[in-house]
Amino acid sequence: MKEKWIKIAAAGGGTIILATLLGLFFLARLFAAPGGENTEAERFIIPLLENTADIENNLFTAGFIKSKWAFNLALSFRGGKIGAGGYKIAKSMGVWQMAGILAGEPYMKWVIIPEGLRKEEIAEVLAKNLGWSEAEKEEWINKDTAEKAGYTEGVYFPETYLIPTDETPADTAKRLIAKFEEKFAPYAKEAAARNIKWTTVVKIASLIQREAADLSDMPLVSGIIWNRLLSDMKLDLDSTLQYARGNTGKGWWAPISAADKNIDSPFNTYKRKGLPPAPIDNPGKAAIAAAVNPEKTDCFYYLHDSDGNIHCAATYKEHQNNINKYLK
């Protein structure tokens, strides 16, 4: 009887050992690389605001991991967070190596450039996101964006970019210009058909971008700017004074003072007729479209009330009435 139980125990122990070995083998396969000897690195992009579950699903669907559970466990040992951006990974990597790379710094980073920034502000955004030195930032402002006439401002298109962290600032400038040329191309054809220089369109678009309260205002603001230009009036735009004044410690676009109207600058449209010598910011697509397709209007003046609503007037007297009604 004793020998029988010994045999049963031995058989049971063997089964447990076998089950344990099979379990370990199964787990090892879950953590193993799915691609074997395929060591070729591929670019894996993680969009902005994508959550971990979606990232795991994409890794699994693309064949980079065998188990979402195993990857999640490995990732938890790395802090459990993955940043948006571009990474280089290969199917020859196990989940531990994969988690280590994706929990680290991406080699490509997302950079969001808002509409209506001047190039100094864009340089700040790029430097912060891409880790530029102060010297690289200053060179971007004073050299990389100043080598070609007509390209000193206005052509660094506001967009969401995925940029390699080792890209030179000069190449980043070319990247933004290339995006501008892509987006501007349809409007360049319209402008040429109307005998309007592309530089004129960009200058006007930059004014619209800073002067309009929202997208719906842009065609009307464009119409008023065109009316003033075609009537040989001074533009009298605060935004051009802000550009001429620069940053005095309260931001690049702080409200102007009465003294600012006496600034001696070709950008002072209170003292000089016509357009400024260059754009005052880098406008978006809506402002460019409005510059080419202004709203037909009899108005020459406009203001925005405290709620941001625009009120225009055909005469200065009507404009004064609007000032008294909406601003006092």
Image (cartoon, rainbow, N blue to C red):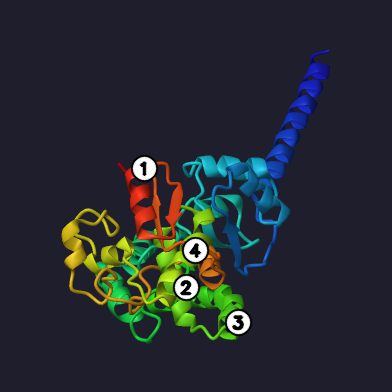
Q: What percent of the width, then of the height, locates residue 224?
A: 45, 65
- Provide the residue designation for mark 2: 176
Image mark count: 4
**26 versus 10 height, above or below:** below
Find the distance from the CA under tag 1 to the CA under tag 4. Answer: 20 Å
* Residue type, numbered disc 3: Lys
Find the distance from the CA under tag 4 to the CA under tag 3. Answer: 27 Å
Q: What percent of the width, then of the height, locates residue 185?
A: 58, 78
- Provide the residue designation for mark 3: 189
- Provide the residue designation for mark 1: 325
Disc 3 is placed on an element classified as: helix
Disc 4 is placed on an element classified as: loop
Disc number placed over residue 298 in the picture, else none: 4
**Closest to the observer: 328 or 131?**
328
Disc number placed over residue 8 in the picture, else none: none
Find the distance from the CA under tag 3 to the CA under tag 1. Answer: 42 Å
* Residue type, numbered disc 4: Asp
Seen in the image, is 298 located left or right of residue 266?
right
* Residue type, numbered disc 1: Lys
Crowd around label 2: few <14 · some 14–19 · many ≥20 (10 Å): some
Q: Are marks 4 and 3 in contact (CB under 8 Å)?
A: no
